[in-house]
Image (cartoon, coloured by chain):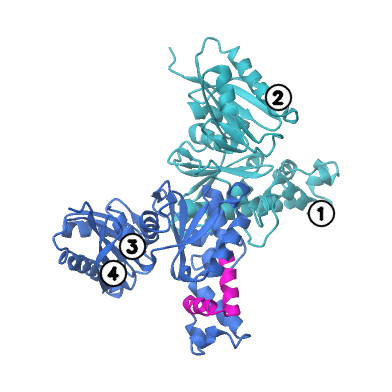
Chain colours: A blue, B cyan
Amino acid sequence: MSSLRYVIGVDLGGTTVKSGLVSSDGKIHAQVKLPSLENEGPKAVIEQIKRSIKGILADVDGKSVEGIGIGAPGVIEKEGGIVKNPPNLSGWNEIPLGDEIHRSFRMNVEVENDANAAAIAEAKFGAGKKYPNFIFVIWGTGVGGGIISNGKIYRGPSGGAGEIGHISIKYNGLMCNCGAKGCVEAYIGQKHLSSRAAKILKEHPGSKIIQLVGGDLSKIEPLYISQAADAGDKVARDILVEAGTFLGVAIGAVMNTLDFRVSIIGGGISAAGKYVFDAITESVKAHVLTPLRNDSIVVPAKLGNCAGILGAAGLVL
Amino acid sequence: MSSLRYVIGVDLGGTTVKSGLVSSDGKIHAQVKLPSLENEGPKAVIEQIKRSIKGILADVDGKSVEGIGIGAPGVIEKEGGIVKNPPNLSGWNEIPLGDEIHRSFRMNVEVENDANAAAIAEAKFGAGKKYPNFIFVIWGTGVGGGIISNGKIYRGPSGGAGEIGHISIKYNGLMCNCGAKGCVEAYIGQKHLSSRAAKILKEHPGSKIIQLVGGDLSKIEPLYISQAADAGDKVARDILVEAGTFLGVAIGAVMNTLDFRVSIIGGGISAAGKYVFDAITESVKAHVLTPLRNDSIVVPAKLGNCAGILGAAGLVL
């Protein structure tokens, strides 16, 4: 009857493993969410992944599942689906996750970096459907990215492409966790945004951010800055506008390198208001070459938390 | 007898048109160099191009010429070989140069941006032969570039990729000719380097640079700074080392975006000593992510002034 195809998409994170049954039209029909148990090491995490996949397979209702796609943190070697040094999974050095999952389920398994998977999701099902070329930026705890070129993910020679968070926007700037100076992530990542807000708020005791965190400045997160900004708080808006301006500098560098016009912004901050996107757009236009300027657009991602599962599914669809 | 193939490579610049008979092993067998007459407008320039090609064809000694490749400034639309807004050819808006030349010579004609052509030359015949992925940087009057990905030029959606000179290395930095702030070209392009040197030299009357320009600071060019540096002049070295450090920041941004390890530096400054390459390398390593750091290398281009003709030839070889 229906000509839809079905696959399983797995979104592996430091806190949870989420698996979903996804059809070729980008709909999620069932979901299983488990703790990833990352502090118990790779074996435990892989067991949780298998458990979540089994949970989906137990309930496919006669549908034939064609394959399994997995989005994971770290650099991924496609051959064998090897996950290398994921930043938030302790004890993982190099784990052949793809082969492990294939052995258990005997179907096609593809593994990809999680930011790349989210970029694929936006390309196939989300805000990037009409754009064959764009940079996807995931702005949350850190700043990650993925490049879609000619409708396909551009992985680079060893799968590490799209690291927009580590583009330096100031040659002698702030020291980043990665060891380099001036990375845009050091300016707009969660930690920096929060500590910058805490500093500024000492002079603005009336800011809504302070109410939202019950007076405890150590509890500031971008989410609260964003909520306060949406409620009209000027301090919060200024912080986010400045951050958006910084992000635009890094996006401009990518646009000039790749001759691209479109950037799609996902991650927690992408839920922020129009003023953030306006700030990013203005900054991108100010930093790209003339032929790119008029066509430059910055659009919010569409898929939110589902991008992980959908992008993973997109690997085998 | 010989299985070599022959094509004509044309290097169109603001001052001269150079054509060469190039064999498939990357040797130039004959050359014709004419003034490009750019101040007389497009028609005159195209006539000079044709004249230079005829000069080569008049002397091919029985060899069969398979095609004509042209490297030109500006953004190039491959279909029709249209040259758009070349910065140093006055009166050119959009000229279908490829079609014009094809009509006259009835053979395969390919047109490409000059920096891209030089990148192709280094990939096929020069310093990039053993590297399938690299960024080629041409550092002279301005700072241009070309991306070789998987052994092929990456042009981007509209042929404008590789504009490394307009990556911002300081978000609120120096104003560039292009209208953006902080472009690396605004820090290390010929004009900036020369005026920076002139400023510094007021406090260093003993510098060799001053001797080389006969005391006339308005005559300073990077070539003289480079010559003075090679002769051991500390002021000159410091200027070039700082410039190399700046270039490394922009190269680092490209490496993190593309997951690349190799950069090849051409243009006038590439003839400078090891200390410049050491400065660039150190800065690149300081700005790329850990997985790229150890393998990062910066190498001088090999083909010098011949890169234009050879790269143009490479378009049809």
Q: Nearer the viewer, mark 2 or mark 4?
A: 2
Residue type highlighted by circle 3 = Ala
Q: Amino acid at mark 1?
A: His
Question: In the rendered image, which residue does mark 3 sit on?
Answer: A72
Furthest residue to the front? A1
Secondary structure at badge 2 equals helix
Discs 3/2, front: 2
Are the residues flagged by discs 2 and 1 in contact, CB closer than 8 Å?
A: no
Residue stretch rendered in magenta on the structure: A221-246
Q: Quadrant of residue B112?
A: top right
| A130 or B157: nearer the viewer | A130
Which secondary structure lies at badge 4?
Answer: strand
State which chain disc 1 sits on.
B
Q: Is any part of residue B77 visible from this angle?
A: yes
The answer to whether the residues at label 1 and label 3 have Cβ atoms under 8 Å apart is: no
- Indicate left or right for B76 with A224 as reference: right
Front residue of A173 and A161 = A161
Q: Are marks 3 and 4 on the same chain?
A: yes
Rendering coords of residue A88 (x, y %): 37, 69
Q: From the viewer's perspective, is the residue at label 2 or at label 1 nearer?
A: 2
Which numbered marker is on residue B204? 1
> In the rendered structure, which disc, 2 or 1, sits on the residue that comes first in sequence?
2
Q: CA distance from mark 3 to mark 2?
A: 59 Å
Residue B170 drawn above or below residue B102: below
Q: CA distance from mark 3 to mark 4?
A: 10 Å
Residue at label 4?
A: A17
What secondary structure is found at the residue carrying circle 1? Answer: loop
User: Mark 4, mark 1: which one is toward the viewer?
Assistant: 4
Residue B44 is tagged as: 2
**SS of the residue at dot 3?**
strand
Same chain shared by disc 2 and disc 1: yes
